[in-house]
Structures are given as C-alpha cells and as structure tokens.
Image (cartoon, grey):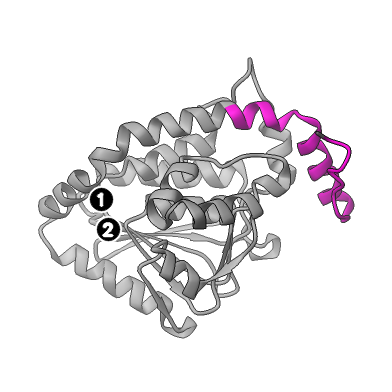
Amino acid sequence: MDILCSKSEGILTLEFNRLERKNAITGAMYQTLADALVAAETDDAVRAILITGKPEIFTAGNDLDDFMKTARPKDGSLDEQRPVFQFMRALYGSSKPVVAAVAGLAIGIGTTLLMHCDLIYAADNAKFSMPFAQLGLCPEFASSLLLAQIAGYPRAAEKLMLGESFPAQEALQMGLISKVVPLEELIPFARGQAAKLVALPAASIRATKRLMKQSRLDPMKAAIAAENQQFSAMLGAPEAKEAFTAFFEKRKPDFSKFA
C-alpha cells in the first residue's frame, strides 16, 4: 500500500510508503489520505494525527506522470473535486491536531501541506523546496499567503520564486517548522508529542486550534481560489509544457524564448 494508515493509542498515523518512487503522490494516494482524514473527524478514538514518510524522503511531491494525466484544466479551472483538493480541504479543515514528521526531501506539496499542519518536526537530514516557478507554474493551496505570513515577504519570495531547496535549520529559522531533531529520534519524538496532545482535553485542543486559525481562514480560501485560477491558466501555457517536457527528457528546460 502506498499510504499506510494505522490507529494506536489515540493517534492516527498516515505514512507515505512508496519509496521506490520517492513517495511521489498519485491521485489514489491523495484519495486515501482524504478519506482517512474525513473519517478521523468523526472518530472519537482519534485525538491526534501524525503524517510522516520514510527516513530517506518525506515526499517528492506530485507524481508527474499521474499529475499530467489527471490535472488538465476544465473550463478554465482545475477540478476542485480531484483527490488532491479533497485531501487539502480535509487537512486544513481538520479540527484535530495534526503533527508532521519530516525526514529527507519535502518537495512541492510536500512542503505546502506542512503549512496546514499544527506541529511540524524535521530530522536533521530534511530539505524543503517549492519549485513551482521552475515548472512554469505558481504557488498552490495558499502557500503564497501562508509562507509570507510565516517567514516574511523577502524569504517567501526567495523560496517561491527561485524554488531552491533549503535545509531544516533554515526552515526552523523561518518559522516553517517547530523543531529539528536527529534523524533516529524523529518518529519517537513526534509520536511522543502527539501522545501529549492525546492526553490533554480534546475540547480544549480543538478550541485552541480553531481560535488560532479562524482569522486566516477566509484569506486562505481566497488565496487558494486565486492560485487555482492562475495555476490552471499556467498549466497549459508554453513555459509549463517546456518544463515538463524537459523533466521527462531529463534535460535542463530552456525558457529563453518565452517573454
């Protein structure tokens, strides 16, 4: 199974388990994640959620083969019933605390999704990147808004425009993650933090989360809508076609002919 789902002692663990493809996420994987989060919302046995990957890699982001087959613009906008939208809505709409444990690479949506979690812990081998511009695209799921709020405009602009990877310590300095721990301690530490949440009054944790997030909910939804519209337009543009063609041909893209 490409997503491992397990429940133990009040914690729902969702683990990327497609190491042979660098945990690249397909539509089927997004659907599994979405369904698990939706089910957890009404499951009293789940008091905290832990999202993790493998020691070598968190996720390489979207599986581009699968993405190009399913992410075609329809009537000028991407289908918001696609599994990735279902997953992200379930993630940012979850009333329960979400802990993320990141080791290795977290690329694209692998970094974006962290901005919608609550406690984010990274191993000392973690690296983050949002290479949307490098693919002829734009930020997604409110990352244009949230990263600027988290890190400030100059740093957000650097990460979103250049798309270069950055290490765990820089992510910590930016405020993107909560703590950096040694790789071998990551999962025990993150699970221990989730266990602390399980032991606290569930109503208090839910209320605290809701109060902290409610002021940014409307701007976040507006940013997602604007990004989706822009992303849809750019997906069919020549720059994106060149970027994806170059990726599959394993060469450097040439954007010099585009204005």
Q: Position of residue 236 (x, y in %)?
A: 74, 28
Q: With 65 as the anchor, is 115 left or right in this view? A: left
**Cα–Cα gap, marks 2 and 1:** 6 Å
Q: Which mark is residue 168?
A: none
Q: Amino acid at mark 1?
A: Lys
Earlier in the chain: of badge 2 and badge 1, it is 2
Q: Which residue carries the number 1 mark?
A: 96
Please tell me whether residue 206 belongs to the stretch shown in magenta: no
**Residue at coordinates 20% horizontally, 44% vertically from top-left?**
210
Place of residue 86 in the rendered image (x, y in percent of width and height, measured from the top left): 46, 35
Query: For residue 252, what is the image quadrant?
Result: bottom right
Query: Mark 2 belongs to which amino acid?
Result: Ala
Q: Is residue 190 above or below residue 249?
A: below
Say how many tags the image has.
2
Q: Position of residue 232 (x, y in %)?
A: 63, 28
Q: Nearer the viewer, residue 186 or 178?
A: 178
Residue 243 shown left or right of residue 200 in the figure: right
Q: Residue at x 79, y 44 (%)?
A: 243
Magenta stretch, residue numbers: 230-258
- Indicate whether 37 appears above or below 48: above
Q: In the rendered image, is residue 106 in sight? A: yes
Q: Which residue is mark 2?
A: 48
- Location of the C terminus (image quadrant): top right
